[in-house]
Amino acid sequence: MKDVGLLPSALTTLSRRGFAKVTSTGLVGSSLLTMLDARRAPAQIKGTTLRILQWSHFVPAYDVWYDKFAKEWGDKNGVKVRVDHIPHLEIPARMAAEFAAGSGHDIIYNGSSILTRLYYKNLVDLSDVADAAGKKYGGWIPAARSLVEVEGRWYGLPIFYILAPMLYRKDLFDQHNLQAPDTWELARTAGRTLKPKGHPTGIALSQCADANLFWRSIFFSHGGTEAETSGANPTLDSKELREFLRFAKAMFDEGMTPEVFSWDDASDNRFLASGIACWIHDAISAYRTTEDTNPTVFKNVILALEPQGIPGKRVSVAAPNVWMVWKFSKNQQAAKEFLAHLIDNDLEGMVQSRGYNMPYLNDRYKKPMPVIGTDPKLQILQDFPKIVAFYGYPGPSTTPIQEIVNTFVFPDMVTRVCRGQNMEEAIKWGVGEYKRIYAKHKGA
Amino acid sequence: MTATSPSGSDAAGARAPAVSLDVPLRPRRWFQSQNWQRLGFGYLLLAPAVLYVLLLVGAPFLFSLYLALSDANVGNPVASFAGLENFRAALESDVFYIALRNSVLFTVVAAILKGVLGTSLAFLLLQPFWGKKIVRGLVVIPFTLPIAISVLSWKWMYDSQFSVINWFLSRIGLIGSYGSADWPIWLGQPYLALAACIIVNVWRTYPFSAIVLLAGFTSVPSEVLDAARVDGTTFMQRFRHVVVPMIAPILLIGFLFDTVFTLSDLSIVYLLTQGGPANATKILPVLAYQVGIQAGALGRGAAISLFLFPLLLPLMILVLRNLKRREY
């Protein structure tokens, strides 16, 4: 008869040293999980210093709150916390410098350009923190995993993303008997109708984050995909791409002006606040800016769900924000503790950012959500998590995708078509760039 | 070697022959010679500068060469030799050729404009007028302002909707109102966007050219100019045949510096357009930064940036040889 022991066979043959190693690892792991669960920081982190590299948020009040929040956590746990804020566009360079030097901050923030896959060998595995948070708050929204998961481990912690609804002028739509832009076709009709009346529309067609995000939303909503689900190969070249480009060209010609070729990420905010735009597709910063600068327009601005491309298909490409911990950090435990505490308070972060920060955890979407759940115009934002996607859809944010995003290949292809280049030539260029970049990363 | 008498008295010493022939002279070693000591001292004085150049110029250059020949990326410290693969990758991309063309165009046009404007400003500043010292101080302000602040101000002036330049042009009737076909979209129309970037570069650095030229002009002895005047030369003749040859070394060094700074300037284009629209303003430093740092492909980024080297090298050799000829 086979002897069936209580211990796995590997453990029955362990040496004393091996036994001590396994049990101590288990004890440390379980105590960390227990502490993470109970939100009680361990005594070992007392007297340490935690350095955090953080972006400068579009909502300055959030930064004030964040700094105070971090300091309070530090005071409570005996940790000296230092938060440095830099513009998010400078983060990749700073990250490269810190990695090369092997020193710098403990926690590092990534916004829009998520570099988890590039650095994962040098980042702390945060799966334990992510698992604990997932269990506690009903799991992560499906898109979260694609940002930070490499070989089954989470090397980053998604804390919030920034979504972009449609913002349209209800007064102008009503005056001209236009339907709310629930489909991209209706949005196009509105542009075509209102541009001659002095109210064009616009989506950036320049080298900025908005152009990268919003044109992809339209493409994906038309059934297009950027890469395979595994992320291994690009899937850009398709009939959906051709349909999308035809649509984009028509929407540009009929409803937009060449101004969009010069826009930065804040231009559409000003376009709406100036009272010119009939609709824009942007983060709610545009709504907030208008509230502060043009109350008359603000009164008439309505937020809508991502329009459908093909019937029933809505995909909203959002700007992700992720926190990571360097492997060279000497204070990894405090870093994990702080991130777990930050996740516990992500709803407060949402309040402090005036509804800008959208959480990744399912339970956070219990209606009414803070800020957006109480403002009738913003309530629609609560329905976005089901349709949120990120770069590389439906695959993960791979390193070739990051290069494609950072060199603006996708919006440049759309720009070429809108400027009048033959569509097939523009596709040949765009698909060629995708293939070239994928090949380089495969060869590396 | 000299020998003194055993008595050691001065008188005896004075009587003794100056050099004793029976004691052989110990020859000086080569490094004890006066010539070599002078040379050694010279090299000692040069050493800090050489060390500075080696550490701050040579080492980064060699490191970028190493990166360009490897498959290094920002997240992987262990790189393997990739040969010329990264250079081949750059040459395969048509964005690279656009960036190369724009870089050359940017540098040449900016250099011409800075030459013309800098010379004019330098002549203006030479003239006697009230408040000359204040004006001389004010003209260098663009050069001293933090680049991020000055470029963001320009970005506002180029705004597609609220451009103060367009507002002014519209008010004086040169263009129509906002929304009309002739309303310039500075950063949105390909040639205008590149011109806009060049204008900012020229605005920022032509005071430097003017100051360099001013220093040169003031070093020309007035007697020489007076003598030329007596000979009946015109202003242009004096400028071409007297002033320019005399200040040529300053001019050439200034030109070299300016070319290097302009060709490798990342900030202006990056802050204004990031290389858009559709790569119309993409220059090599911006492309290298986007590929090497933002996308993490250090090897390919380094290879793109090294293409600046063969562009600059012939120019540097020409200028330095010209300078050397003038020394003799």
Image: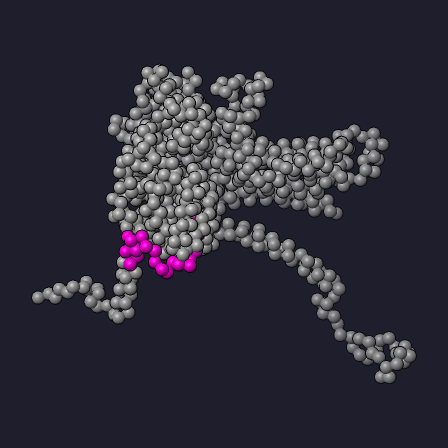
Residue B316: give x, y in percent of width and height. 62, 44
Q: How many marks?
A: 0
Q: Nearer the viewer, residue B95 or A190?
A: A190
Query: Where B1 sits versus B131, above or below?
Result: below
Does the magenta portion include A301? Answer: no
**Residue stretch in magenta:** A31-52
Q: Nearer the viewer, residue B35 or A181?
A: A181
- Residue A414 is at least partly visible in this image: no
Q: Nearer the viewer, residue B104 or A50?
A: A50
Residue A420: give x, y in percent of width and height. 42, 24
The quadrant of the image that shows the N terminus of chain A is: bottom left
Residue at the (66%, 45%) spot, across then down: B320
Query: Where B316 sits versus A193, above or below?
Result: below
Residue at the (70%, 66%) spot, across then down: B31
Residue B231: give x, y in percent of width and height. 84, 32
Name the outermost residue toward the bottom.
Answer: B7
Residue at the (47%, 38%) spot, across then down: B96
Q: Is residue A133 left or right of residue B144?
A: left
**Residue A204, image quadrant:** top left
Does the magenta portion include A47? Answer: yes
Q: Nearer the viewer, residue B17 or B269?
A: B269
Q: Is residue A232 left or right of residue A51?
A: left
**Residue B124, image quadrant:** top right
Residue A27: give x, y in percent of width and height. 27, 61
Query: Where B16 sits versus A153, above or below?
Result: below
